Amino acid sequence: MAVSKKIRELQEKRNQILLGGGQQAIEKQKAMGKRTARERILGLLDKDSFLEYDLFVEHDARDFDMDKKSLPSDGVIIGSGTIHGDPVAVYAQDFTVAGGSLGMMHSRKITKIMDYALKMRMPLIGINDSGGARIQEGVNSLAGYGEIFFRNTISSGVIPQISVILGPCAGGAVYSPALTDFVFVVENISKMFITGPEVIKTVLGEEISMEDLGGARVHSEVTGNAHFFAMSEEECFAQIKRLLTFIPWNNSTGAKIIESCEPDASYDPEKIVPDDPTLPYDVRDVIRSVVDKSDFFEVMV
């Protein structure tokens, strides 16, 4: 009986953690057109492939009454799974828990999955939805970012690092994505900036919206920080899955070998390129006329 009670208590605790910041916070997330962190991971990976690590981790901060606060999973979900049947490592920051802010244990979870991805030579996908450093943890938060940045650099050129910006990310939360190989953004959801509009107003006296300061279109059309732009989270995940069909899993293996085949006959370079050099044409169609199956996936459109 005692064992059965403990099992029930464990299951109840697990169910509570799976709710993240609670039902009210989840509803607020949905009202902004955003999925929860857990829904994002399950929507990206192959069905029933996700294996979560360190579900029961909590923060260990004591200052500023943090010892009285419970932050489920310390605001980040990590684990491994598959995409197209191949293994990947993934983490997703949970904005319903303290705004996805990064503290010491939060950063340790991220660095753990980064180390695992590098050791196993598999792609790392980071779903970023964080307001930045957790100020209550002070320098420990900054040290955590340093550990993450270090791993970004040693993984560069070894495994693919993919960042997905799915919320208002500021400060340290955008430094790491800038060090990765590919950055994905979504219309009206993604925000990337070093400091927010309020700081700009205080320092420069200028008023600017979050969208104009660091929205998805700004970074995909102006700054060039984003490599892929999507209109929805679903489209974004489809783009990630497609990208992974083109690139190798690590620096010691080649990309998947596919059977060579002819381009789509509808793309005829003789018909695409006009005789008159002053007339415009779409060079993308020329590319499609020479690649297998006319399958061309453009980066930084």
Image: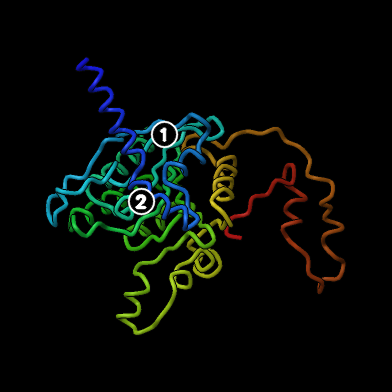
Label 2 close to label 1 by CB (< 8 Å): no
Coordinates of residue 293 in the picture (x, y in percent): 74, 42
State how far apart marks 2 and 1 are (Cα): 22 Å
Query: How many discs appear?
Result: 2
Coordinates of residue 72 in the picture (x, y in percent): 28, 43
Question: Circle 2 — which element?
Answer: loop
Question: Circle 1 — which element?
Answer: strand
Q: Which mark is residue 80?
A: 1
Q: Is residue 95 left or right of residue 4?
A: right
The amino acid pointed to by label 1 is Ser
Residue closest to the eye, 66 or 130: 66
Q: Is residue 18 left or right of residue 134?
A: right
Residue at the spot x=46%, y=42% of the render? 39
The colour scheme used to paint the residues is rainbow
> What residue would you read off at disc 2?
96
Q: Is residue 39 left or right of residue 52?
A: right
Task: Give the mark nearest the N terminus, 2 or 1.
Answer: 1
Image-quadrant location for residue 115? top left
The amino acid pointed to by label 2 is Thr
Image-quadrant location for residue 134? bottom left
Coordinates of residue 240 in the picture (x, y in percent): 54, 46
Residue closest to the eye, 290 or 237: 237
Image-quadrant location for residue 274? bottom right
Disc 2: CA contacts within 10 A as few (<14), some (14-19) or many (>=20): many
Q: Is residue 292 left or right of residue 255?
A: right
Residue at the spot x=47%, y=56% of the render? 31
The N terminus is located in which quarter?
top left
